[in-house]
Amino acid sequence: MIQGKRLCSPWTLLSSLLLAAALAQAAPPSCGTQFQYSCSAATLGGYTVITPLASTGQTEITGYNTSNTVVFDVTIPIPPSGASASDSPTQNAVLQADTLLAASLGPACNGTVQADCTAPNPGGKTVVTNSTSSTYVAQDTPVSQQVNRYSTTLKAILNGSQNVYQQTFAVAFTDPAVQAAVTAADAILTGDNATFGAPAQTSTSTVLQSSQLSYVLTGDTAATGNITTTTTDTFGPAAILVGDNQTEVFIVLSGQLDINVNTNIEYYAARNDVTTNTYLTTQSYTISGSATAPATPAPASWLLLVIGLGVAGLLTWLRRLRNPEA
């Protein structure tokens, strides 16, 4: 890169207000932090948006200028999980986008807002600059995990047909909630003077409900050993990225040729490809109780006979009282 002192001046209040007004019409909802996902992070010259691509385990960083035109768009194999600020590749890509957006302001970059944030240009018809960059290649490790869900139905049956208790729980049979229900069902059968045994399993089945793939970043510091050097010729006027990790802006003057030598180092983005299989186990348990039937009541004809005999005996006794000699 062109050597020179790099000092970044703070934004002035006026420039911040102008930038906010320019972004208000086109930008998505504002971010709370620069590296927040799925929102607009304002920066000098426009705004950046970090978009998680869950289906592929990647992250896209897009830079928009104040006219809502895309001037930076890169997708890296960093999964959209966790805080994006913890992913250094994401940070580097956002900083590169911010740098290029600052350059897109043109003359405003040479004013008091950000006077010294561009690499110095020595002039001349031809100038050589240097830069470094990083790219990432996914190094995936398959991982499987199982999630078990339950649907447990408990019944209490009296004398083989009378259902005195039934309830379904979203937990296993051994869960305290089901065991409390067993106690409640036993109490109902006890109240019916029934004898009963332990719950018996009457049915069971386990089926796969869903299978979901997610990505978890485990590291991004190991170099693959692949280093590529490229040379790019740029005729001015133009703005290019130079310096370590392409974090500085170099303004190529009108009529000037810039020869940029970039060294790209490839790194592994180690991540786990986690497949989560969710299974549903459905089970039914039954507590069977039996109660002794009460004694069969006497038929009505026998009752009438007993009453008739009693009345006849009473009449005979009364006659004997009236006529002792009979």
Image (spheres, rainbow, N blue to C red):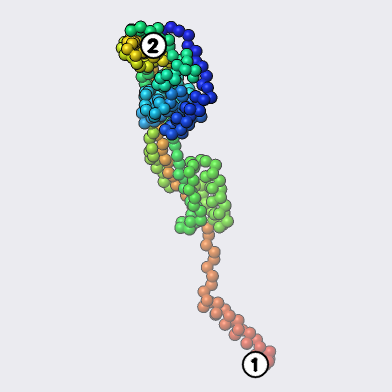
Q: What is the spatial separation of the Cα atoms under label 1 and label 2, in whole angstroms? A: 145 Å
Q: Secondary structure at mark 2?
A: strand
Q: Nearer the viewer, mark 1 or mark 2?
A: 2
Residue 171 percent across, percent down from the top left: 49, 42
- Can residue 222 be spotted in the picture? no
Which amino acid, mark 1? Ala
- Residue 1 vs 210, above or below: the answer is above
For the C terminus, the quadrant is bottom right
Residue 319 percent across, percent down from the top left: 65, 90
Q: Residue at x 39, y 14 (%)?
A: 251
Which amino acid, mark 2? Ser
Q: Residue at x 57, y 78 (%)?
A: 306
Front one among 177 and 187: 177
Earlier-in-chain disc, 1 versus 2: 2
**Label placed on residue 131:** 2
For the N terminus, the quadrant is top left
Front one among 12 and 211: 12
Front one among 302 and 258: 258
Instruction: Report crowding for label 1: few under 14, some 14 to 19, many 20 or more residues within 10 A (C-alpha).
Output: few
Q: Residue at x 55, y 79 (%)?
A: 304
Q: Which residue is mark 1?
A: 326
Disc 1 + disc 2, Cβ < 8 Å: no
- Residue 240 vs 188, above or below: the answer is above
Q: Residue at x 45, y 16 (%)?
A: 110
